[in-house]
Image (tube, helix red, strand yellow):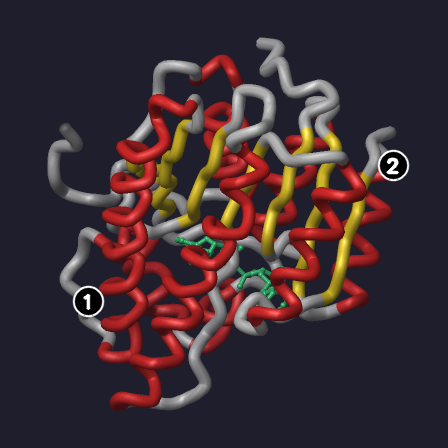
Amino acid sequence: MDLQLTGRRALVTGASRGIGRAIAKSLAAEGARVAICARGQEGVDLALAELRALGVEAYGESIDMRDNAALEGFVSRVATQFGGLDLVVSNVSTRPEAPQGEARWRQAFEADLLHHVRLTDLTVPFLLKGQQPSLVFLASIAANMKQLMPEEVAYGAFKAALVNYAGHLSERYGRKGLRVNTVSPSPIYFKGGAWDVFERENPKMFEAVKAMTPLGRFGTPQEVANAVAFLLSPVASYITGVNLRIDGGMLKTTNF
Ligand SMILES: NC(=O)c1ccc[n+]([C@@H]2O[C@H](COP(=O)([O-])OP(=O)(O)OC[C@H]3O[C@@H](n4cnc5c(N)ncnc54)[C@H](OP(=O)(O)O)[C@@H]3O)[C@@H](O)[C@H]2O)c1
């Protein structure tokens, strides 16, 4: 299916590895122009080379999403470079460093909610002038689950808030032509990702989590990217306000 993304101007945050990188690559493979960011310059450079090898224009910067001024500058330079924006994927999540308590909650708030709001505020003015614009947030099925691991409580709570926020945006901007959706993956496995570490450090738990999925395996970044590319595309023109689970059936509730 042609996703009709040729020439579209896309921005994907956190695209130097994992899910974000697979999304950026999928959009480039569909002919979109893609801007990316991450903190590590080396990862940005490698991802940019991969995107350009697909024959599209690609732009990237090393920034920390939690740095307001840096984010503002990045969005402004991307919009100048591309002459506007049509598609935005707000993907970044940063693991808090504080082990517990209020400090961890504050860091998780910055890492899993506030930068999504800032990115929205900065990019919506461009999206509203864009061509069939679409905005997708990366949440998680952790939003729906009662967290068993204490260090995941704030992550789940803020991902739930993100889904709620995206619903609000879909209502607010629908009549202006902007669609807003969320995707919620279950554990997604890739080398260098969190579950790769988990597999080595806690193999028993790793296998137990895998066994919870009816499909009997972890998802891949590409499987998430496929759904995000679809939601971003005009092919999904009547879909807004949705939180799409990409979880191999892991959540044990009917999804309606
Ligand atoms: N992987 C899973 O199992 C899973 C499951 C459910 C939901 N999700 C969600 O899917 C999204 C992507 O997950 P992932 O596993 O692919 O993430 P990841 O491996 O942690 O990669 C995150 C990307 O964002 C960048 N990044 C992290 N913090 C940043 C910051 N403060 N500023 C700028 N860039 C930053 C990273 O590069 P640098 O480190 O160089 O900055 C990297 O490119 C996240 O929102 C996550 O919560 C993931």
| Residue under label 2 | 53
SS at circle 1:
loop
The C terminus: image quadrant:
top left
Q: Which of 105 and 198 is in front in this view?
A: 105
| Image coordinates for residue 209, horizontal then vertical, percent | 30, 57
Q: Is residue 252 left or right of residue 130?
A: left
Tell me the CA gap for discs 1 and 2.
Answer: 41 Å
Residue at screen point 17% across, 32% down: 255
Placement of 202 over or under 97, stated as above or below: above
Instruction: Tell whether circle 1 marks a residue whose Cβ is less than 8 angstroms from ligand 1.
Output: no
Label disc, if present, on residue 147 of the rendered structure: 1
Placement of 205 over or under 235, stated as above or below: below
| Image coordinates for residue 219, horizontal then vertical, percent | 44, 43
The amino acid marked with disc number 2 is: Ala
| Image coordinates for residue 64, horizontal then vertical, percent | 62, 70
Label disc, if present, on residue 113 of the rendered structure: none
Q: Nearer the viewer, residue 240 or 46?
A: 240
